[in-house]
Amino acid sequence: MPRQPYSVEQVAELLGLHVKTVRTYVRDGRLKAVRIGKQYRIAPEDLDAFLGHPVTAPATGTTGRRRHAEASSIVQVDAITPDAAMTVGNTLIAAVNGRAPGGRPLRVETIYDEERASLKIIIVGGVADTAELLRFVTTLTEETTPAEGPA
């Protein structure tokens, strides 16, 4: 017997979160849901995937698996000023946050080492999205000024 979909309120209660938090997850595309009228319904399989549990096969008899390719990239930019590193990091994060909801997750993290004047950019996501963001990194880092060394 298939499990019934959850309401936002039920998911919030199960996870110990506020209803508005769960709605935000749905709107941001972090938690997959279907809108029925003015309410969202979350399939048990989607909740399991959100929580990181193994995804169970749907009751329709299909395997429920789709081919999935993910890429992770680490980019190191040397000789970059703190201001330029901040600009690059903020621009990349804004680009990721400005994407249309419902797409595959794309994560970006930046770490700046002041002693070495080095910026590390970590990108994890779908192959095409990661490649697009790497092209964007190339554009951003070519425009930045190098860090000033000892004269």
Image (spheres, rainbow, N blue to C red):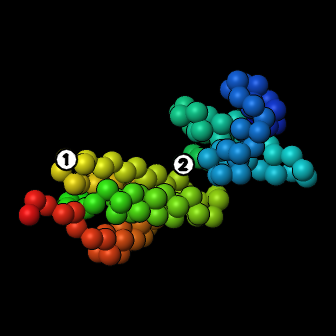
Amino acid carrying label 1: it is: Glu
Kindly identify the residue that appears in the image at 66 percent across and 36 percent down. Answer: 47
Q: Where's residue 38, x and y in %?
A: 90, 50
Residue 115: numbered disc: 1
Query: With respect to residue 92, does 32 lie above or below?
Result: above
- For mark 1, does the 10 Å Cα neighbourhood hold few (<14), some (14 to 19), or many (20 or more) residues? few
Residue 65: numbered disc: 2
Relative depth, front residue between 106 and 59: 106
Kindly identify the residue that appears in the image at 71 percent across and 29 percent down. Answer: 17
Q: Where's residue 148, x and y in %?
A: 18, 63
- For mark 2, does the 10 Å Cα neighbourhood hold few (<14), some (14 to 19), or many (20 or more) residues? few
Quarter of the picture containing the C terminus is bottom left
Task: Name the element at disc 2.
Answer: loop
Residue 7: numbered disc: none
Quarter of the picture containing the N terminus is top right
The mark tally for this picture is 2
Amino acid carrying label 2: it is: Arg
Q: Where's residue 107, x and y in %?
A: 46, 51
